[in-house]
Image (spheres, grey):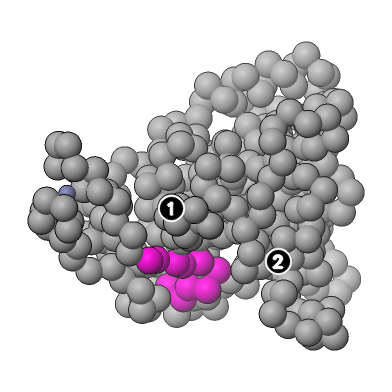
Amino acid sequence: MQPRTRASTNLRETELLRAEAFREALRPPTHAELDHLNATERSSTRTGLDATDWRCWKCRSLYGPIKNLFIDLPWPICTRPGCGTRNPAFFEFKLTSMVFCRVSLNMPVYDQGHRPSCAIYAAATVALMKTKIEWARAPHNPTCTISIDMERLVDNFFEYYFHDLTRSAGTWIELAMRYLVVVGAPVLYLVNPPRQPNPANNIMIDSYFCVDHTDHCLVTRLLASGIPLTGRIVSGRRMDFATCGEIYLPPPRGLADDDHHFVTLIGAGLRQRSDGVFEICYAVRDSHSIYVHPNSQLGFEQRRGALGGDFQVYARDVDAIWGVNLG
Ligand SMILES: [Zn+2]
């Protein structure tokens, strides 16, 4: 992967780069690697929802919790041959509410406006969250005030690759990941007069990986281990009405006026559906401003100024998941 001059590439070249970027995607961390990672490190700030031992009530097998950096998850299912009982123990967490080594992992809610740039927003959000976690690990000042100049990032990204507007915005993740490897996200300078960003300070990623979106247990565990991810959903017309505590049910795939949309997966939890079945859902952060997805429990006046930006989706409704590795 060679850096190239910042000039629009043509459609054919962009498609070749997309295919190349997809081939370059690494494998995500395995459960064994996460066991090792989480055995050496454990956040002292806990959610209060750390899972404990679970004894299967059918076959009496005993399972310990799955230890993670931020929250210990309940063992999901009895693995004894012929049993397969599911553990309905509740869990819920959101990385943006976590504090790690005195560094808050809360993130700004961006507003992508009308540009089809959700993939680069989601990728940059994940890169910045990972940067914060790495910053927290390092033994220096606990204030981490890095901000990404999103406007400049999106302008540059659009300049770098050919944007075929007939393609869904939800197909841009490979190129967004590749862009963060090759160029990176410019840091915002809040000084007056504004300085030209120094490319040497760009927030860059080293590599990226694609996670099997059907492996809900691994995805949940990656999130619980402080590894934020980007996820793709179908954004129907009702998406904007999903409030932060509620689950958005996307329309069936393939409807003409619906589009794929990338969001940041920032947490997970267990929900009971109306038919009684327990199902994993993810907390997602959108890039459509703080005025979208506010808490529906608030009154109208309060809601207008309330922080929104997050909602929830069932794990089965997320159909592509990617993560990043820093250098
Ligand atoms: Zn069992």
Q: Is residue 180 visible?
A: no
Which mark is drawn over residue 243?
Answer: 2
Say what secondary structure mark 2 lies in: loop
In percent of width and height, residue 271 lies at 48, 60
Which residue has dot 1 on it?
Answer: 277
**Residue 54: x percent and y percent?**
19, 62
Residue 127 higher or lower than 29, as above or below:
below
Farthest residue toward the front? 275
Choose between 168 and 144: the one closer to the eye. Answer: 168
- Please report the bounds of the magenta region as a residue range: 90-101
Residue at the spot x=81%, y=18% of the render? 11
Give the residue type that dot 1 points to. Val
Q: Quadrant of residue 189?
A: bottom right
Residue displayed at 35% across by 74% down: 49
Instruction: State the residue in front, 116 or 150.
Output: 116
Write down the quadrant of residue 167 in the picture: top right
Question: Residue 110 shows which numbered tag?
Answer: none
Can residue 82 be seen in this snapshot?
A: yes
| Mark 2 vs mark 1: in front | 1
- Which residue is drawn at the image coordinates 57% and 36% (left, top)? 320
Q: Nearer the viewer, residue 150 or 278?
A: 278
The quarter of the rendered structure image containing the N terminus is top right
* Horizontal arrangement in the rendering, residue 243 relative to residue 195 (left or right): left
Q: Position of residue 141 (x, y in %)?
A: 48, 78
Is 133 covered by the magenta stretch? no
Q: Residue at x 78, y 31 (%)?
A: 255
- N-term-proximal mark, 2 vs 1: 2
Count of numbered circles in the view:
2
